[in-house]
Each structure stands twice: as structure tokens, then as C-alpha cells.
Image (spheres, rainbow, N blue to C red):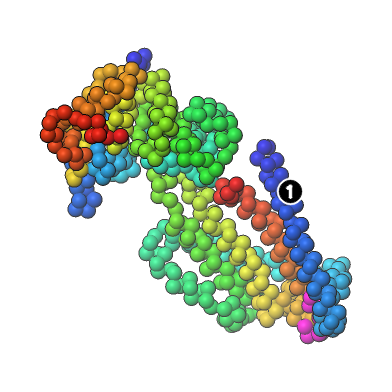
Amino acid sequence: MILLRSGLKSFLIYLWSGWGAIASLMLFLAVWEWAGLYYGELILPNPRITFRTLAELIADGSAWQELTITARRALIGFGAALAVGSTLGLVAGLSMTASMMSRPIVTVLIGTPPIAWLVLALLWFGNGDGTPIFTVFVACMPIVFVGAMQGARTLDGQLGDVATAYRLPPLMRFTDIVLPHVVSYLFPAWIIALGISWKVVVMAELLASSDGVGAALAVSRSHLDTAATLAWITAVVGLLLAVEYLLLEPIKREIERWRVAV
Amino acid sequence: MTTAVHAPAHLEVRGLGHKFALQTILEAIDLDVTSGEVVALVGPSGCGKTTLLHLCVGLMPVRTGQIISSFNNPACMFQQPRLLPWKSTLDNIALGLKAAGTGRDERTRRARMLGLQTGLAHEDLGKFPHQLSGGMQSRVALARALAIMPDLLLLDEPFSALDIGLKAELYALLLHHLNTCSLGVLMITHDLMEAIRLSDTILVMAPSPGRIVHRFRIDLPAMQRDDAFVYKITAELLQDSAVRTSFRLAPIKSGLLTRQELPC
């Protein structure tokens, strides 16, 4: 109960600290408005038109429909990358040989542009859900893998001795000694991977799918509908910001409280 | 001293040896610790004291010789506090209790009690290790060791990084605890006077290979030893040629020891 209350309190303090962020966002909107006036509505619709278009999209139900499709694809790919990357990374981190061998492979995977994977995925999976999901998976997995591997590699052997000396049972050894350390490396990697998954899925849909936000962007581009394009972009970015700052960042703060220097 | 009916527990080390690659770290170590007894291993740095203690704790497999222990609940203090950075002071103290399956309320109560006994303040109990000073962290490590109510305490120079005053205070806490519940202690130190102040049996070790070169018993109870007594015994021990060689001190010429030669 006390834990919950202190958690709520720190969450509220965190929200209050968001005023600075909101102020800078407002400044951004002002610059956008000014640029819109300068270039005209066809090139760059101003924020008011964009938000009105977005509201219309939400009102007629198409926004939620496309966003749900896109989110489902992104989350499946992201979830698979999380599971595979975390597991393989931990295993690789526990063995010196495995981590040495995996390093160049990871460099290759990270270095290959997502668009190249997308082309391959199109050839392999065609126009279905498989293409965006695979592209997201392949773009996110190496990043999660590296995070997990670093976490396992940097485990403190001295704390392992403490666990042995105080006769910690294997499960408690994992939950109390290994996990808190590894999570402090894994969680930031997960957050980065989520951002990447969201960007990559839209790109993949734009080129490979007939539904989802990416496909809607392709349609609005072909209609030269700049306002709708900006509305979709706003929806995608807004959703990512909301997830990251309202959900993930507070969780990260809570589990890494022991790191914060006071 | 003890009112228990069963025989006192016993740690028995016989013919213990240890090698890292081709280098012999320990050779033919024999020692005994009985409950209620404090045994100190004294020797210069690098003579294998820590290896010996790690073998007793079970952090390394015994390859030569044997270690037989009838103690059920040994606790260990390392050279550094080695607290878990992601646990609060209270949870760090309760670590061994949690491992033993003690319920949350009970272990929090005992951890709180021990934390306060070892001189931590109420507000320190909720802090994380990085928010505590070195001395406070050592107190937490001590409380963590005492929390499981050990019958054998293995100490690897746990307070060597602290200043003299703090060290004396923590050793006083330890002595007080030893007096109330009779437990066996095997402590490592490179400080001869510290060993004389606290222990019943002193084993002096010499390096390469690590071996015991001198055994010494003090019969006066630790609580009754004063500074004069400690100085006297230290001087006596330093007359011994095996002890002098172990600490690489020059052989005595006149037979009389000057004040400057006392280690501090």
C-alpha cells in the first residue's frame, strides 16, 4: 500500500515535470503554424487543419481501424523480437565464446537497412501480415539482443558469491540477483526497440500492404492530400509519445529507482 | 557457557591445500574452530587468507585435504560490503532470512531490529546502498550477517577500509554479539593487534605457499583485554622469529623491541 502510494506520488511528480516538454511542443506547433502561413495550405497545412482532419478521421472510425491493424502488426513483431532477442542475448552473454561469435553477426543485422529487409520480406511473404511483422522483428531483434547480452556479460561475480554464501535458492538467485541487473540493461533496449518497431511498421505498410496506417498514408499521398498525410503522421507519433512517456518511462523510473543519485 | 545439551559445533580443516594453475596458494592447513571460540588468521597480504576463507564458505571446490563442519548456519562478511544496489537497506539485511524462507513481516521486523542495533538510523533503513556512506554500508553488511542468527561467522577483513574509530565501534558491536550468543568465529586480518584484541586463538600465516607457521592462544576473555594487554602480547608475538619472517620484518638484534616496530 505504502509502495503503491509512493509510486503514485512519484508518477504525479513525473507528470508535473511534463510542463517543460509541453511548452517546447507548443513552441514547435507555433513554428509549424508560421511555416504553414508562409508556404500555403497545399504544401504545409497548419496544425489546426491537421488536427481537424485527424478529428474527422477519428470520428468516422477509420483512424482507429487502421491504427489497430498497424499496432497489432508492430506489437507482434516487437513481441517476437523481445522474446527471441532477450532469450538469445542472455544465453550469449553467459558464454564468452557465444558473445564473441555473435558480435559480427549482430553488426551485420543492425547495419542492414530495414528497407532491404522489406524487399526480401516482400519476396518471401508477399502482401500479407507477414511482411511488416517480419521487417519489424528483424529491425528490433538485434537491439534487444545486444541489451540482453550486455546485461548478462556485466553480471557481478561478487554478488554471486554473496548469493552462494547466504544460500539463496536458485529461483531467488535469479529474481533477486540476476534479474534486477539484467532488466536495467534490457528495459532501455526494449524502449528503443518499440520506437523502431513503430517506425518500421509504417514504412513496411506503405510499400507492402493494402491496409494499416502506412497504406492510408500511401493513399493520401496519391490524392495529394497533405492534410490527411500530416494527420496520420500526427496520430502515429502521438500514439508513440503517449505509450513511451505515459507508460514506459514511469515504469523505467520505478524499476531503476535504485540507480537515481539523490 | 552455552546451555545447549548437544555437543558444541565444530569446524575442522585438515591438510587443506589449493593451487591456481601451477602456483601453490595453500599447503597443509590444519585448523579448528569450536562454537564460542574466535580464531584469527593473521598474515601479510597475498598469503592465501582469503582463498582459505572462500574454501570454508564453499565458494570454491576443495581439491586437496578436507573441511568438515558441523555448523548449520554459517554467515560470511566479505572485504567489501557487497550489498545489492537494487535493494533497500532493510531488504539487504533481510537477504539471508528471505533465502531461508522467513515470512515478510517477520524478516522485516528482525532486519529493522538488527539495523537499529548496528547503529543505523530509522531513515537509513529505506535508503539504497549508494545513498549510504562506507561506514553505514559496513554496518548493513554486519547486520545482514547477524540477521540469520549464525552459529559460525566467517570474516574476511570486513572493516579494513574503515577508520580506526569506526572499526573499533563495529568490533565492539561484534564482541557484544559474541558475548550474548556463543558462536564460532573465523576471522582474517593483516592487523596483529586487531587479532590480539578479539581472538582466543591466533594462527600466523606465511606466504608462498600459504601455510600456518605459528599458533598462539590467549586465555584472558576478550572483554577484559585493555590496550596495555594488547601492546604487551603484540610485543611478545613479534619476538617470535617465525612471525617476524612472515611479515618480512628484520630479525631482532638486541632482543628488545622498540615502540616504532609495533605494527599499527
At horizontal 64% and vertical 67% (from top left) the residue drawn is A195
Number of marks: 1
Which residue is at a point 13% across and 29% down the rendered structure image? B255
As shown in the figure, which amino acid type bears the numbered disc 1? Leu
Q: Position of residue B204 (x, y in %)?
A: 22, 34
Which quadrant holds the N terminus of chain B? top left
Q: Is residue A38 above or below residue B126?
A: below
Please, which chain is the residue tagged with disc 1 on? A
The one nearer the camera, B77 or A136, is: B77
Magenta segment, principal secondary structure? helix
Indicate whether residue B65 is drawn in magenta: no
Percent coordinates x, y for residue A77 in the rendering: 61, 67
B9 sits left or right of B258 in the view = right
Nearest the viewer among A86 and B236 is B236
Residue at position x 87%, y 71% in the image: A48
Residue B140 is at least partly visible in this image: yes
Which residue is tagged 1? A12
Where residue B193 sits, quadrant-wise, is: top left
Name the foreground residue: B60 vs A65: B60
Residue B151 is left or right of residue B131, and the answer is: left
Picture layout, residue A54 above or below residue B126? below
Residue A40, image x and y in percent? 86, 83
Residue at image point 33% right, 17% down: B224
- Start and end of the magenta stretch? A221-230
> Element at badge 1?
helix
Left or right: where A41 falls relative to A92: right
